């Protein structure tokens, strides 16, 4: 049976499309066929691939990665979040190669692409489970939306003119109410994304926790909080105020009427992500954010 790797591509740059052609040729030379989305592959200068190893066209719907060994993502974090929709239902691991800017979710950089493809061909990689968030929105006792997030689920204002008045509940108890632009509930994976920009802490991905980060809140007590991964969070929108929106990973949104309630819990289905070199998370932070470490000496050598 022919081995397959699904490719998800950011098509915005010509260099990305040329890189995809290189990937197809390199994997085909090792007997691995690509799965691709028709519109993405139409833009790739694919050249001549061996007979029987022409790309397999898939529809891009959730679960379309079923049967692939890995979903290889060429792009930035937005492309990887799009690929997660295809991979999560069937448990296929994601492997991101950063062709964007920061690309915090990516495991590899463009300059290490050849080594990354070798690792795929030889099966030399580990897989991490990343927790997700499930969101259920209700209004007048009826469920109006269900969704999930890898990075964060946010309840935020849908118009610029007025802030939202919201009540935050944790484990069935009211915690605080305030006016704000929104409230983010993030995973450790998402702590370097929107939550970080909103002033939240960075949490190591191996930590199991949920982050609550108010956005531009008008209150004395509106600090980011790290809570149990098994806590049940609810955000209630003031019934006399403006409507809001539930947004998951910046990709899936649902309108919320005034008075809506959004319940957030740990997701039952995780997202699986490939690890190649076991690089410490601290090293990734230093590299991605160009953090200064001048003067570091490290632990002194132990005596005999």
Image (spheres, rainbow, N blue to C red):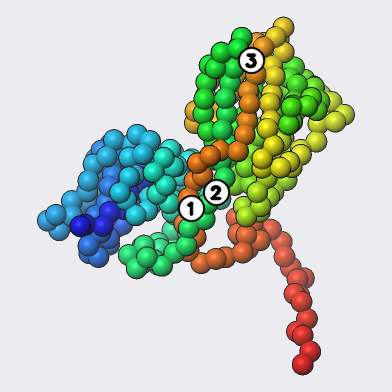
Which residue has dot 1 on it? 273
Report the disc number at residue 130: 2
Q: Position of residue 298 (x, y in %)?
A: 75, 74
Work out which quarter of the rendered image holds the C terminus and state it: bottom right
Left or right of residue 16, residue 146 in this image:
right
Which residue has dot 3 on it? 260
Disc 2 to disc 1: CB gap under 8 Å: yes
**Label located before the other in sequence (1 or 3):** 3
- Identified at 69% across, 24% down, the residue is 235
**Label located before the other in sequence (2 or 1):** 2
Task: Examine the rendering and report whether any part of residue 289 can be seen.
Answer: no
Work out which quarter of the rendered image holds the N terminus and state it: bottom left
Secondary structure type for disc 1: strand
Tell me: residue 152, above or below residue 300: above
**Label located before the other in sequence (3 or 2):** 2
- Identified at 78% across, 81% down, the residue is 300
Q: CA distance from mark 1 to mark 3?
A: 34 Å
Secondary structure type for disc 3: loop
Left or right of residue 25, residue 167 in this image:
right
Left or right of residue 186, residue 299 in this image:
right
Left or right of residue 32, residue 282 in this image:
right
Label count reads 3
- Identified at 65% across, 10% down, the residue is 258
């Amino acid at each position: 049976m022919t081995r397959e790797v699904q490719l998800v591509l950011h098509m915005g740059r010509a260099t990305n499309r040329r890189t995809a052609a290189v990937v197809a040729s390199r994997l085909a030379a090792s007997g691995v066929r690509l799965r691709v989305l028709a519109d993405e592959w139409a833009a790739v200068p694919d050249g001549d691939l061996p007979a029987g190893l022409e790309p397999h066209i898939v529809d891009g719907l959730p679960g379309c990665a079923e049967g692939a060994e890995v979903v290889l993502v060429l792009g930035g974090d937005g492309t990887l979040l799009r690929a997660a929709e295809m991979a999560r239902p069937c448990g296929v691991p994601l492997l991101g190669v950063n062709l964007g800017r920061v690309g915090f979710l990516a495991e590899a950089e463009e300059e290490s692409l050849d080594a990354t493809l070798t690792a795929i061909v030889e099966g030399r990689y580990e897989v991490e489970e990343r927790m997700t968030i499930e969101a259920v929105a209700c209004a007048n006792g009826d469920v109006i939306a269900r969704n999930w997030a890898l990075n964060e689920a946010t309840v935020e204002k849908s118009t610029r003119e007025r802030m939202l008045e919201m009540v935050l509940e944790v484990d069935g108890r009211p915690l605080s109410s305030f006016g704000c632009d929104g409230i983010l509930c993030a995973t450790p994976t998402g702590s370097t994304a929107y939550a970080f920009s909103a002033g939240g802490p960075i949490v190591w991905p191996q930590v199991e926790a949920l982050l609550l980060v108010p956005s531009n809140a008008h209150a004395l007590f509106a600090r980011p909080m790290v809570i149990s991964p098994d806590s049940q969070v609810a955000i209630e929108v003031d019934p006399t105020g403006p409507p809001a929106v539930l947004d998951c990973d910046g990709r899936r949104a649902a309108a919320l009427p005034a008075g809506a309630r959004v319940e957030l819990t740990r997701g039952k289905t995780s997202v699986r992500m490939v690890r190649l070199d076991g690089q410490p998370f601290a090293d990734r932070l230093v590299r991605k954010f160009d953090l200064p470490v001048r003067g570091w000496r490290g632990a002194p050598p132990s005596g005999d």
